[in-house]
Amino acid sequence: MRARGFLALGFAAGCLGAMAWVLTPTAAVKSGVPDGPTVGGTRLFENVLRHVRSFGVDSVTDQELYRLAATGVIEELDDPYAVLLLPGQRLKQDGAEPAPQGLFLDRQDGLVIVVAAVAGSAGEAAGVRSGDMLVAVDSALLDATDLDRVQRLLDGSAGSRVTLRVRRDGVRAAIPLTLVRAEVPKVPATESFAMNDGVGRVVIRRFPTGLSDSVRAGIVALRTGGVRSLVLDLRGAVGGGLSDGVALADLFLDG
């Protein structure tokens, strides 16, 4: 019931804004919808669909209308991790690579959040921290629903300067940070090394496809070198799909 209600709402958001047509209460009542029992929201959806077919300025096939409706459902969820994949499309692994200036960004509660900053990047050098809320780039206020625009604002020629305004837990006013744009340094996704007292440390910075194979190789090398216990450091780790996380967990957990 709830899903179909969202479908009607998403249909209105995805279709009606692109078409000019008039829907009158009288026309809606006389549209021929049966009076029998219906699921909540079904009648609304059927009325909208019928009127778009009849009065839409642009000719749109039923298949395209349903695609727009499904897209509207996903958009209305306001879930950055929900995406509609149609046959032949592949999932883009958002977050697998940093934004310009080495910042991994996400949206949370309508805000642009810095998940992590690449070590040695312009973002880290400017003092951006994990958990910072990115409010503005120069005078441009940021919209969390359009992370592509945020990336475009951050991008620029090496050596140019930009002012970031961030909000940080425990600090009342927004903090201005001057950032000097630079190329993002290449940092490996994972790194393994031995510490004292037979302890090894595996650092994971991001989750590319096949990460578990690299981690397994690092663990084998540490054991060969005499490491008896292991620290798995996931602080600031970003990106990746569910299958990559499961594959990593399988190295340490049984069924």
Image (cartoon, rainbow, N blue to C red):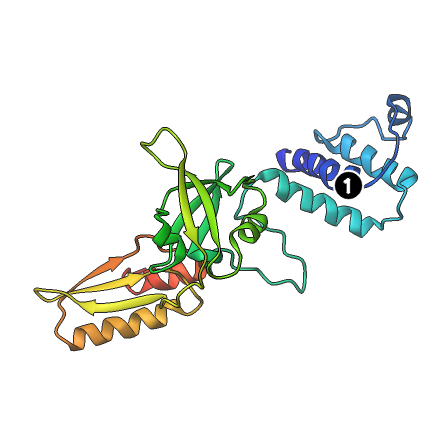
- Apparent side of residue 44 relative to residue 166 in the rendered image (left or right): right
Report the number of discs.
Answer: 1
Q: Please, is residue 236 above or below residue 11 in the view?
A: below
Give the amino acid at mark 1. Answer: Cys
**Residue 99: x percent and y percent?**
48, 56
Label 1 Cα neighbours within 10 Å, binned few <14 / some 14-19 / many ≥20: many
As drawn, the residue found furthest toward the top would be 26
**Residue 34: x percent and y percent?**
85, 30
Q: Please, is residue 157 above or below residue 83 in the view?
A: below
Q: Quadrant of residue 19?
A: top right
Q: Please, is residue 252 above or below residue 59 in the view?
A: below
- In the picture, which quadrant includes the C terminus? bottom left
- Apparent side of residue 121 relative to residue 79 in the rendered image (left or right): left
The residue singled out by tag 1 in the image is: 15
**Residue 234: x percent and y percent?**
30, 55
- Apparent side of residue 130 relative to residue 197 in the rendered image (left or right): right
Question: Which residue corresponds to the image point at 38% horizontal and 51% vertical from the top-left?
Answer: 116
Question: Which residue corresponds to the image point at 78% horizontal and 31% vertical from the top-left?
Answer: 43
Front residue of this view, candidates 249 and 195: 195
Front residue of this view, candidates 73 and 189: 189
Question: Which residue corresponds to the image point at 46% horizontal and 45% vertical from the top-left?
Answer: 163
